[in-house]
Amino acid sequence: MENDLSNYRKSYEKGELLLVDVPENPLELFQKWFYEVDKHFPEQENNAMTISTIGLDGFPKNRVVLLKKFTHEGFIFYTNYNSEKGKAISKNPNVCLSFFWHSAERQVIIKGKTEKIAPNLSDGYFESRPKGSQLGALASNQSKEVPDRAFLEKQLKAIETQYEGKEVARPSHWGGYIVKPVELEFWQGRPNRLHDRIRYRLQSDFTWRINRLSP
């Protein structure tokens, strides 16, 4: 099978990103971009991000997760700590996050170090989830092989029966991570493939070194 995609073309013309316009702190620029995208393109799942880890087999692996909060410290998401990604993070906490907001012709790439957040913060978020999502976290042994779909549905049904009329406590193997950034790159598509790329690198004194990269 062969598919030639060489004629796929798009001209990026929706914005610019100049050094004179960026703040000293990259989290401020991320916040600005995120809210601009969310305002103008609310129909998209703008908090969807790709997280890359180095697996126990030595290979990198990407998957999409949902950003649930960002602060001056970093980016928070939730998952099963015993999942493939959780085990990868346990061995090597260095990860890469990326956001691609195609409607705005923008991309953000973030390198950072991952830490578990405090248990009480994970408790608070778990309690805010719909009960179906809470039960799903208990029913799914994430990343483990299963024989078929019916097996999963049977497990969920058993959990639903067990917790009928009861509150669901957060399981200890499920919770949040925060990715504390050491490098952020902001990409704005431009005509003729001369895209704007601005990189922030964290320095030893906790200031950020800012420079422009060639596209």
Image: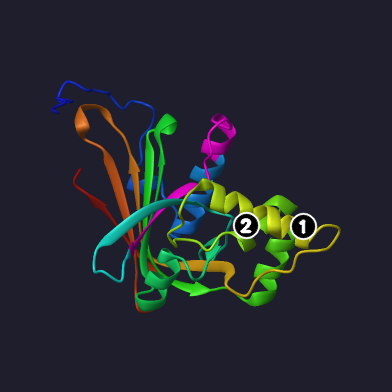
Q: Is residue 187 visible?
A: yes
Q: Position of residue 139 (x, y in %)?
A: 61, 60
Q: Is residue 41 inside the magenta stretch?
A: yes
| Residue 155 marker | 2
Amino acid type for the residue under numbered disc 1: Thr
| Residue 161 marker | 1
Amino acid type for the residue under numbered disc 2: Gln
Q: Position of residue 157 (x, y in %)?
A: 69, 53
Quarter holding residue 172: bottom right
Q: Quadrant of the C terminus?
A: top left
Question: Which of the pair 72/38 is nearer the observer?
Answer: 38
In the rendered structure, which segment of residues is drawn in magenta?
36-53
Q: Position of residue 102 (x, y in %)?
A: 40, 33
- Callout 2: SS: helix
Q: Is residue 73 visible?
A: no
Q: Residue at x 50, y 61 (%)?
A: 142
